[in-house]
Image (spheres, rainbow, N blue to C red):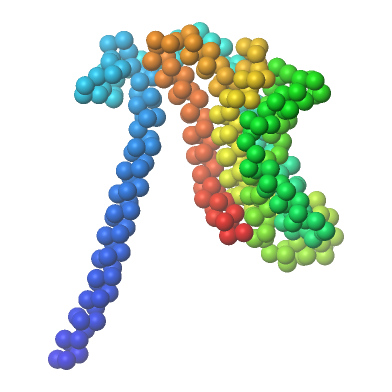
Amino acid sequence: MELAQSTPNRMSPLRSLSWRKTRETIFWYFVLILIALFTVFPFVWVFFTSFKGPADAIVSVPPQLIPKDPTFDNYIRVWNQLPIPAFFMNSVIVSLSTVVLNLLFCSLAAYPLGKMKFKGRDLIFYLLLATFVIPPQLTSIPSYVLAVNVFKYYDSILALIFPNLATVFNIFLLRQAFKTVPNDLIEAGKMDGASDLRVWWSILLPVIRPSLATAAIFTFVNQWNDFFWPSLMLHTRTHMTLQVGLVAMQGMMTSDARGMAAGVTMTIIPIIIFFVLLQRHFVRGLGGAVKG
C-alpha cells in the first residue's frame, strides 16, 4: 500500500514539469505564429492586390483581401509597358554570376584563414573584419571613379558583378565553417598526395555545403534587391536590373496601385523560389558558423 501511494507522488513532479514545458512550447509557438503573420501579411496583401480588377477596391472598410474579380491584366500591362524580360534577365545574370564567383573567391580566401598556419594570419582576418563596419555608401564615390575612369565598365552589368566578387561576411562565414572540419581529413588527403587546391575542392567544400548554401542565399538576396549601386552605374534601359526598372515603372504608374503590386510581386517571387530550393541547408549553415 505504501509503495502504491508513493508512486503517484513521485510522478506528480514529472507531470508538472511536463505540463510546464508544454505551456511554454504553446506560448512560444503562439508568439512565433503572431510574428510570422505580421511579417507575411504585407506580401500577402500585395500579392492579392496584383490580381485585383477595376471593380475591386484597393482600400476599403472592412479591408478586402481576396479579389472578387481576379485578373492577370495587371501583369500583362506591366509586361507590355516596360522591357520586363530584359530587366528580369539582367537581374538573373547578375545575381547568379555574383553568387557563383563570390562563393569561389570567398571560399579560396577563407581556406587559408581557417586552416593554414602562417605569420600574420589573424591580423589579416581582423583587418578584413574591420572593413565590415564601413558603410557601402562611404566607398561609393571612389568605387564610382574606379568604375568609370579605370575599369571602364560604366553602364554595364559587369559593374555590378566585379565589385561583389568577394565580401567580408561570406569570408567570415566560410572561415568559421572551415574551422569546424577536423584536421584529420586534411592530413589524410595530403598523405594521399592531394594538393591544397585538391583538399579545398574535394574534401572541404563538400563538408561545408550547408554554409555554402547560406552564403549563396545571402548573396543572391542582397544582389537581387540592390538598388543604390545599380542606379549609379546603369542608365541604358536595356541594361537595367529589375529593381532599377521598377523605379521607372513607379514614375509611369503613380496612380496604378494594381500595376505596382504586380511589379513588386514579380521581384519577390524569384527570391522565395531560391530560398525554398536551399532552405534545408540554411539553418545548418548558420549553426555551423556559430559553432565555429
Q: How many marks?
A: 0
**Residue at (62%, 36%) from the top-left corner?**
135
- Position in image of residue 229 (x %, y %): 64, 25
In the rendered image of this protein, does residue 292 appear above or below residue 229? below
Choose between 278 and 149: the one closer to the eye.
149
Q: Nearer the viewer, residue 188 or 107?
A: 107
Spot the residue most to the bottom.
2
Quadrant occupied by the N terminus: bottom left
Q: Is residue 177 left or right of residue 113?
A: left
Q: Determine the image quadrant of residue 19.
A: bottom left
Q: Against 10, is 277 above or below? A: above
Q: Return the residue nearer the eye: 292 or 193.
A: 292
Q: Is residue 80 left or right of residue 207?
A: left
Q: Report if residue 163 is visible in the image.
A: yes
Is residue 97 in sight in this rendering?
Answer: no
Q: Give the left or right position of residue 280, taking residue 61 as reference.
A: right
| Residue at x-position 46% and y-position 22% | 264
Q: Position of residue 152 (x, y in %)?
A: 79, 20
197 is higher (above) or lower (below) than 161: below
Q: Position of residue 126 (x, y in %)?
A: 71, 52
Q: Which quadrant would residue 18 be assigned to in this image?
A: bottom left
Residue 168 percent location from the top left of the image: 67, 43
Quadrant containing the C terminus in the rendered view: bottom right
Q: Residue at x 53, y 13 (%)?
A: 248
